[in-house]
Image: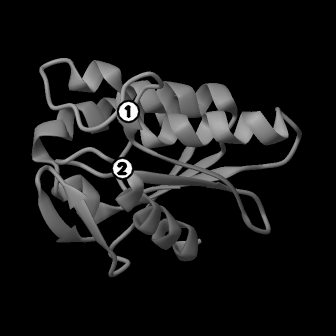
Amino acid sequence: MINYLREAARLSWCSTDPRTKIGAVIYDAEKSIANGFNDLSAGYEGVYTGKDKYKLTLHAEQAAIFDYFRYYKKDDRRIGMAATAACCTECAKAIVAAGISEVLTCKRALEAMPAWEEEFEIGHQILAAGGVKLILVPEIGEEVFMSGELITI
């Protein structure tokens, strides 16, 4: 499963966000089957840093879910998600609604974004209430860009 988290970390570099680059991978029992990264919603191009950036950004977890449903629709397979950041409330709701059974992320990613601590805590409560297992791994040795700085998760 760590390989899926490494894949998400490498994918995060596709994001055009200058401050935070997040990647997410959806996997089944055998392989990764969908992915996404945070970026501006369709119709917006380039780099946007204005006050509404958060409202205009499609999160990596949401992009991976849309990618999954684009190709697989909803079938009976058990799927999980690996993401380079902990789940915010919006993504947690989407993960539960999509039927994802587990989320894998790095503990270091939680520590790297202290301004999001309360948001992540509520997101994790949403996951637990929806029956989604949260798996925190200590470190995977991949570099990602979060909150304006390069960190190793």
The quarter of the rendered structure image containing the N terminus is bottom right
Judging from the image, what secondary structure is the residue with disc 1 in?
A: helix
Q: Is residue 142 above or below residue 8?
A: below
Q: Residue 15, labelled with which disc? A: 2
Number of marks present in the image shown = 2
Residue annotated with mark 1: 123
Residue displayed at 36% across by 61% down: 13
Q: Is residue 65 above or below residue 104?
A: above
Instruction: Name the foreground residue: 150 vs 106.
Output: 150
Res 57 → quadrant: top left
Tell me if residue 130 can be seen: no
Q: Badge 2 local density, few (<14 within 10 Å), some, or many (20+)?
A: many
Distance, label 2 to label 1, CA atoms, is: 22 Å
Judging from the image, what secondary structure is the residue with disc 2 in?
A: loop
Q: Residue 33, labelled with which disc? A: none
Give coordinates of residue 151: x percent, y percent: 18, 69
Residues at circles 2 and 1 in contact by the CB criterion of under 8 Å: no
Q: Is residue 137 above or below residue 46?
A: below
Tell me if residue 122 can be seen: yes
Residue displayed at 58% across by 52% down: 81
Give coordinates of residue 95: x percent, y percent: 57, 34
Q: Amino acid at mark 2?
A: Ser
* Left or right of residue 140: residue 110: left
Instruction: Name the foreground residue: 100 vs 68.
Output: 68
Give coordinates of residue 14: x percent, y percent: 41, 56
